[in-house]
Image (tube, rainbow, N blue to C red):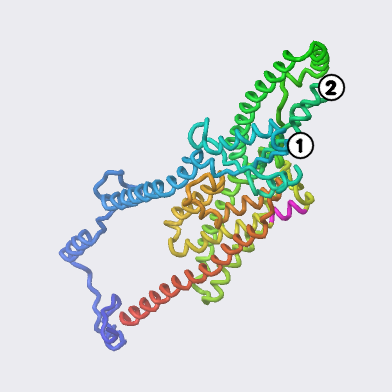
Amino acid sequence: MDSSRNSIAGTTVDGHSKEDTYIKKEPTRGELGHRMAEDEVQAPTGPRKFQHGFWDTEVAHLRKMYFNILGMTVVLLIVAMWLFFSLYWGSLGETAQHVPNLKGYVINRDGSVGDGLLGQAIVAAFEANSRGEGVPEKQHLTWTVVDSSYLASNEDVAHAVVEEEVWAAVVVNSDATSILTSARSSGNSSYDPRTAITFYYNQGRNEIAANSFIVPYTNTLLQSTLSAFNAKTNAQYFTSLANGAEKTRQEAAVAISQAPQTVSQPFGYQAVNLRPYTKTASQAVLLVGQIYIIILGFIITMTHDFARGTISPFLRFTSYARMRVLVPLVIYIPLSFSYAMVNLPFKITFDAKYSYAGGFFLFWVFVYLGMAALGLATEAMITLLTPRFIAYFLIALIISNVSVASVPIVLQPSFYRYGYGFPVFNLSQAVRTIIFNTKDRLGLNAGVLLAWVVLSMITVPLFTWLMRRKDEQAEKQKNAEQRVVV
């Protein structure tokens, strides 16, 4: 090829121009016509920029490509919709069928056996309720009657509820029946019917479970039981007065006038919310805000994918792998701190368990761990899926995490128990501990989040190595082909 080439300037043989043999001629009319014909044949016949309508035949192949891309996207979205939207719908669709999974205690301190009529009535009613008697199917909690010696004081009962031993507890307080009898006979105007029974629950553990099931179901059961028992005990009381002496009736009338509540409502109850859901803004950090954390991590993943493309081809694998892991972890620091700071004007109760400053900085640490766990997951998967398909993984990541964080897992089918090992569930539990002072599982929650971070710190370099190996092989093949051509 190098020994003989035609040149516009002349004929080159062995690299030397024979200019003395070159005779410059003007092209004849025939030659010009022939060249024009060749130019017309060789002129591009494809689409020209900015010159066509959508349905022009010149862009038919491009239009086909356009529709193929849109069609494939629609198909993939429909598949993703059925796979992942169904996962979320399923997490909420049968919660009412699993209410018996919510456990509660009944403690009877109402005197000795035979004397505490109120305690006996409450125990019988709650045992019947646990068997589903008198209520629609599965619309009841499961109540266990606990000996009063197991939880010797009401403080112990409250502690058991806060520590999530049970979801609720109903205590018939000490000598409730005899206290009413004494108040009736003495006309004790300070008698408070609500002191007879105490109902403990923990709204901060999960406000949906508390507001939708625990409180309404327990209130309904207590009200119906007490209504029937109050009517019965009043009937027995007035019957005994009618059969008694006139003096007894007169004394009773005086006592009733002094303490009318002893007959208008002999027994009542008091509901004690041990961990109130104090701020509606808390919903932002417990669920919706965690979706934002995933989105923030995803934005960093996409930006990092674009940015590293400018330098990654020139880096050794070890340097490139370190960059892919460490750079996002550094970027998450200011992002997570800013996310934590956004909550300050809205008076989130960071001082529920610790000092306000301590609670805030602990909240920031967990937000950082959550962002690292979720963000690095997308950083790993974009290596395999590429930016073209990573959005489908984002859908899966959001829905699989959110599905187990809104309602208690015990109210969901057993399949959703995977949530105990997922980032958003553990981040949500940690946040509840910090802002509501619920049961402390911070060590376990941090361990799960760190496990996800470590997993991604392994998969990011591994997937990078696989893709780099493929790219290096392609580059070697390209170079080899170029050498052959040359």
State which region is magenta.
358-364
Q: Picture quarter containing residue 329?
A: bottom right
Query: How busy is the neighbourhood of tag 1: few (under 14 within 10 Å), some, or many (20 plus)?
Result: many
SS at circle 1:
loop
Q: Position of residue 455 (x, y in %)?
A: 54, 66
Viewer-side residue, 456 vs 233 = 233
Q: Does 417 appear in magenta?
A: no
**Quarter of the image with the N terminus in it:** bottom left
Q: In this image, 5 relative to 304: left or right? A: left
Q: Which amino acid is tagged 2? A: Ser
Viewer-side residue, 33 vs 431 = 431
- View extreme (left): residue: 30
Query: Which residue does the numbered mark 1 point to in the structure image?
Result: 174
SS at circle 2:
helix
Residue at 63% x, 57% y is: 445
Q: Position of residue 186 (x, y in %)?
A: 84, 22
Which badge, 2 or 1, comes first in the chain's sequence? 1
Query: Which residue does the numbered mark 2 point to in the structure image?
Result: 186
Q: Label for residue 243?
A: none
Q: Picture quarter containing residue 255?
A: top right
Query: How busy is the neighbourhood of tag 2: few (under 14 within 10 Å), some, or many (20 plus)?
Result: some
Q: How far apart, in angstroms, are the residues tagged by discs 2 and 1?
A: 19 Å
